[in-house]
Amino acid sequence: MSDSKGPLSAADALPPVEPPSAAFLVQLFLVPGIIVSIIVCVWLAFHWLAHLGNDPQAYVRTLQRDNEGRWQAALNLANDLRGPGGGALKEDEALARELGRILSEEATSGRTGEQSQTLRLYLCRALGEFSVPSAATTLIERAGDATDPQTARAAVEALSVLQANLAAAGRGLADPGAATEAVIGASRSDDAPLRSAAAFTLGVLGGQPAVERLLALTGDTVDDVRFNAALGLARQGRTEAYEGLGEMLALADIPAGPADDAATQSQRYKRALVVVNALRGVALLVDAGHEPPPAAIVDRVKAVAADPVGDVRSSASALLKKIERVAVPAAA
């Protein structure tokens, strides 16, 4: 027995060293490994579920069912096509043709309820997100249907998106003349939102018939139609757009209302959007002609460079710099 009053030796101070037991090794390595494996499996399961909707046949099966929830499948498909993982779907010719068939069937079914209308709108939107010419066939048919202005408007808007997608892929519409003719017909509708959408799409489609119709639409009684016609002409490099762009630039800011005045805030936002789009239209014409715009337009751009809305100011300042760059060589 050691003397309790004497110093402790190393053997007395530390417990004896023993090799680790099998149970200890299991707790140290195997249990955490199982936990990590479970986490990885759960993540893979969620990843699989998240991409399950990208199965074209799953969408088709849902859309073929005669139930009120089909519009949700059409919305999900449109979002998937627009999303970063929609590349393969955009190129699926069979899917585009089947969606067109379902849209035609629904449009001619005689159903007029909200569910049917919503389904048609989202099917149009989905077709516009494709990058294959066959997606245009049913959109052209729907765009020319004057009896259903809501679907016609969705189809006209989708044609502009489809045209942009095809151009980005180095392709074009199979029958651009038919598309232009259908949109020109829509531009003659009594429905102002449809005429406005048609004016925008004609600017995207281009071609002489589209330009001639845009020139006529610059005299429309509805502001949105005139503004979209001016932007369409600017997109086509036509200086006749300056008159409408000047009107857009002259829109005065709307005084801010109470913090809870949603209507005033919406009006201010729309006015700012119109002015920014007008500045972009002027920029397109400057780039197309490599010369400054008329003096009256430059004066209006300078005026909005002091606008209370930041986006308007920054866009105007950038445009003024562009104008200065093209003006210097002209003066030299």
Image (cartoon, rainbow, N blue to C red):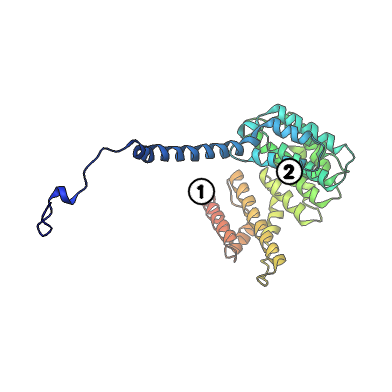
* Position in image of residue 271 (x %, y %): 68, 61
Q: Are marks 1 and 2 in contact (CB under 8 Å)?
A: no
Is residue 25 at all visible to an observer of this figure?
Answer: yes
Q: Which residue is mark 1?
A: 329
Amino acid, disc 1: Pro
C-alpha separation, residue under disc 1 versus residue under disc 2: 56 Å
* Position in image of residue 128 (x %, y %): 71, 38
Q: Which residue is mark 2?
A: 72
Q: Crowdedness of circle 1 by 10 Å Cα count: few (<14), some, many (20+)?
A: few
Mark identifier at residue 24: none
Q: Residue at horizontal 68%, vertical 34%?
A: 130
Q: Residue at horizontal 68%, vertical 67%?
A: 254
Q: Residue 112's image quarter?
A: top right
- Say which label, 1 or 2, has the lower sequence index: 2
- Vertical placement of residue 126 versus 195, above or below: above
**Element at badge 1?**
helix
Decide if residue 179 is on the left or right side of residue 317: right
Q: Give the total number of marks visible in the rendering.
A: 2
Q: Residue 62's image quarter?
A: top right
Amino acid, disc 2: Gln
Q: Crowdedness of circle 2 by 10 Å Cα count: few (<14), some, many (20+)?
A: some
Which residue is outermost to the bottom? 258
Decide if residue 28 is on the left or right side of residue 324: left
